[in-house]
Image: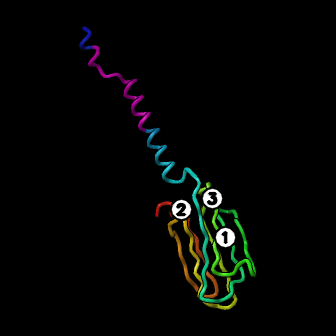
Amino acid sequence: MNDIQSTRRPRPALWLAVVAVIVVAAIAVFVLARGGGPHTVTFEVTSSGEKISTITYGSGEQQLGKDVGAAAAAPWSKSYEVTDTSGKLWVHVLSPAGGAITCTIWVDQKVVMESTALSGATCEIPFDDALDQ
């Protein structure tokens, strides 16, 4: 075989290396875009004037906090940097007065869940779904 024929021959090792680099780059982009870094999560509660008795909120199985009495006065909000994107984001609000209560969950400054109900409200959304919005 002469030199010209050997240089035109496909090199399987080179192609395998190119494909591997492309796959690794695609995975890195996916991880960073889907939840590879911390996300700012804000839990927010408003009411039509009624007193709120309890606000509990969390991420996954972890309760991030519980505010009662004066600490639960509306309008109310708390923000956290969250890195674990497994499970769901949630906020539960109770009001003995029976008025309209609205809970809202924000992820990276975008509303991902909002709910209004009488005597309390519940907002829950899987973190993966929140990142898709």
Q: Is residue 25 magenta?
A: no
Residue 16: x and y in percent read: 40, 29
In the image: residue 97, left or right of residue 100: right
Image: magenta residue range: 6-22
SS assignment at label 1:
strand
Residue drawn at the location 64% of the way across and 91% of the way down: 98
SS assignment at label 3:
strand
| Display coloring | rainbow
Identify the mark nearer the N-term, 3 or 1.
1
SS assignment at label 2:
loop
In the image: residue 66, left or right of residue 49: right
The picture quadrant where one finds residue 79 is bottom right
Residue drawn at the location 65% of the way across and 69% of the way down: 78
Q: Which residue is mark 3?
A: 81
Q: Is residue 21 magenta?
A: yes
Quick check: 59 above or below 33?
below
Residue drawn at the location 55% of the way across and 82% of the way down: 116
The picture quadrant where one finds residue 23 is top left
Residue 37: x and y in percent read: 57, 51
Identify the mark nearer the N-term, 3 or 2.
3
**Residue type, label 2:** Asp
Q: Which residue is mark 1?
A: 57
What secondary structure predominates along the stretch shown in magenta?
Answer: helix
Work out whether residue 10 or residue 91 is closer to the camera in this orientation and state it: 91
Quick check: 49 above or below 46?
below
Residue drawn at the location 28% of the way across and 16% of the way down: 7
Q: Which residue is mark 2?
A: 108
Q: What is the number of the mark on residue 112?
A: none
